[in-house]
Image (spheres, rainbow, N blue to C red):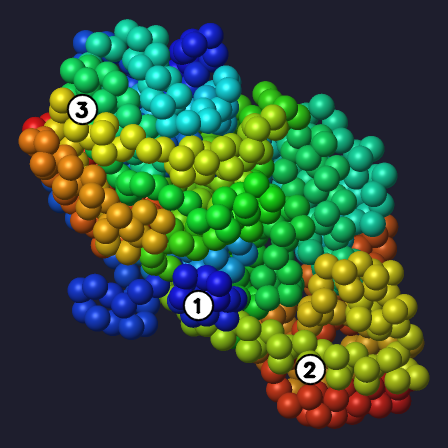
Amino acid sequence: MKLLVNGAETYCYTGGKAFDAARPTVVFIHGVLHDHSVWILQSRYLANHGWNVLAVDLPGHCRSAGEAPSTVEEAADFIGALLDAAGVQRAALVGHSWGSLIALEAASRLRERISHLVLVGTSFPMKVSQVLLDASSNEPMKALKMVNVFSRSTLAAPPSALGPGTWVYGASMALGRRVLASNRAVNVFHRGFKACDSYANGEVAITQITCPVLFVLGAQDQMTMPRAAQGLIGKARESGKTVRVTNLPVGHHQMTETPDETLFAIRDFIAS
Amino acid sequence: MSGYSDPGFDTLALHAGAAPDPTTGARAVPIHLTTSFVFESSDHAAALFNLERAGHVYSRISNPTNAVFEQRMAALEGGIGAIATASGQAALHLSIATLMGAGSHIVASTALYGGSQNLLHYTLRRFGIDTTFVKPGDIDGWRAAVQPNTKLFFGETVGNPGLDVLDIPTVSAIAHEAGVPLLVDSTLTSPWLIKPFEHGADLVYHSATKFLSGHGTVIGGVVVDGGSFDWEGPHSAGKFAELTEAYEGFHNMVFSEESTVGAFLLRARREGLRDFGACMSPHTAWLILQGIETLPLRMARHMSNTQKVVEFLTSQPFVSRVGHPMLDTHPSHALAQKLLPRGAGSVFSFDLKGHREQGKKFIETLKVFSHLANVGDCRSLVIHPASTTHFRMSDEALAGAGISQGTIRLSIGLEDPEDLIDDLKRALKAAEKAV
């Protein structure tokens, strides 16, 4: 469905079900060079099992107009505006990679409006190597390949978002090219990576959230290595949050290389 | 970045889509000869039917052995996914039927396999889909043939049997200007010789019966989606309602919303395999996988043998023409050098100087070459196109495809090249004497 957020038309995939404000809502937030479609196998299931789903295309990405966010904080404010535009008082936030930082910051700002926080493939700080940052700007196709090589953990993924016969690596490459091409004004690849790299408020934000938090980590993740999430997990525990950690035998393509395991982790957590 | 995370073509040919079986430890791909797959629960069943979860339900729609073949082909072509079909013709039909219905129009190359030409020129017309045929090298012709209802451009990487090389970069650019995808039949080249997506094609299909299987044992096909074509793009808006509007026939799904890059594959599998039913047997998929595992080795040998045979034939006085793009006399020579640096395939034609009876004598004298209707076998093959594969075509259409009554088509196999040349030498001598 389309919503007007901050004056810009914003697309949200609702899992094939009509939006119903009476039901609990889950907002899915994608990462750099992704869009709503990376969440299909998680969002469509939840939409058909009692939840409202808003799998958003971030501003300036694919089907959404508006200025692509330059910082995690800017994107977090957008999430608040999205909830307002949808008339949603309270929601669970699920974010992947860059989207996990946006979800974290949004949860710290929106406090009680957030019922659950799920951080998939996260780390803090989420530093991006200078080589990759430069490549995302100067040689985006080369950088896209690097990201997808680092992200995959298998040459034989189970049936995934397009069903059996999906070559997850190729699908992710194609999606990256499509997202990049969707914004002629701004290199959303470089801008997204810069936002990840420069975000500094993670450890503060995790102490400010008021909801339980789930970390879904990929044991073989080379983009956001599990050890780089431990500081955030420690801070959450130290500050008395309810923390759950799920480790999946996968890389950074959690939603497409382990679709069921990622879904079950999210489903069981937000139902708790 | 080479290595497991970024494997090369030969490694993908062996490993893409397959891992040791988690239950049995079987290293080779198991053949899942089962029609159906047990649901874990009623909820699991409903979720699979509604595409909330991914998995196998019924082998007409998907099967684990076929899925390995599909992933492998997508990996080798550089695509996002693939669908195995009962034959190459089924792959072509599935592609067309997914994208259009009655009232639609296709622009296609004249240099097509006879069966494809037949489908477009006769059969699909009966269902309200018209085709305008354009010589593959007539670039202005491709552009001029576009109509408001055009939904697809279609050609072969190298046309059968004249080996006209399709200028994929140029033709795809014209297609994209017109807001339609370019579908390419890459059967004669295989991804070892060319990956059409890298040059601008949007969909690729193969008769897997040929080089992919490589052993002349099974009939099969596959269509691969490059994930590059934007069905809702500025030039294509409104053209592909099949993919961009809610489909009552499948949960009111809007395929282009479900998948930003995979709408075609979603509809092709969920509607095309479900309703038309031209699926592949898992046993067939397994046999084709055996072939693909040695595709790089076989293709290299096909090409080196072809070079030797072409060189031999060009030196024979009884041969009036050898039609292979490796020769600078071939009209596609320059384009082949650019798009097909490893070679333009091992299926090609040549003309004898003699009359029809001499041609017959030539074919019947051959002993190593088998006279049959196939190409891309590990064994060398021979046929007379005008009376067999292309017999339904008019003389005009035959000429358009570069075929005369004296044309002989060879498919060069993997035998000792000296034996192939010896066989041809004897047959040429016998033909020459048969006056």
Identify the mark at residue B228; answer none if there is no mark. none
The image shows residue A89 at horizontal and vertical percentages of 22, 10
Q: Report whether B358 appears left or right of B129.
A: right
- Count neighbours of disc 1 (C-alpha within 10 A) and say few if under 14, some if 14 to 19, many if 20 or more: few
Q: Where A120 sits versus B64, above or below?
A: above
Q: Secondary structure at mark 2?
A: helix
Identify the mark at residue A208; answer none if there is no mark. 3
Which quarter of the rendering shows the N terminus of chain A? top left
Q: Is residue B298 visible?
A: yes
Q: Report whether A271 appears left or right of B53.
A: left
Chain designation of label 1: B
Chain designation of label 3: A
Which quarter of the rendering shows the C terminus of chain A? top left
Question: Mark 1 and mark 3: span between their CA atoms?
Answer: 43 Å
The answer to whether marks 2 and 3 sit on the same chain is no
Residue B385 falls in image quadrant: bottom right
- Count neighbours of disc 2 (C-alpha within 10 A) and say few if under 14, some if 14 to 19, many if 20 or more: many
Residue under label 2:
B305
Going 72% across and 39% down the picture, which residue do you hit? B173
Residue B286 falls in image quadrant: bottom left
Q: Nearer the viewer, mark 1 or mark 2?
A: 1
Q: Where B66 sits versus A253, above or below?
A: below
The image shows residue B273 at horizontal and vertical percentages of 42, 43
Residue under label 1:
B3
Q: Where A78 sits versus B434, above or below?
A: above
> Which three-letter amino acid code belongs to the residue tagged 1?
Gly
Going 69% across and 56% down the picture, which residue do you hit? B157
> Which three-letter amino acid code belongs to the residue tagged 2?
Asn
Going 33% across and 28% down the picture, which residue do you hit? A102
Question: Mark 1 and mark 2: span between their CA atoms?
Answer: 31 Å
The answer to whether marks 1 and 2 sit on the same chain is yes
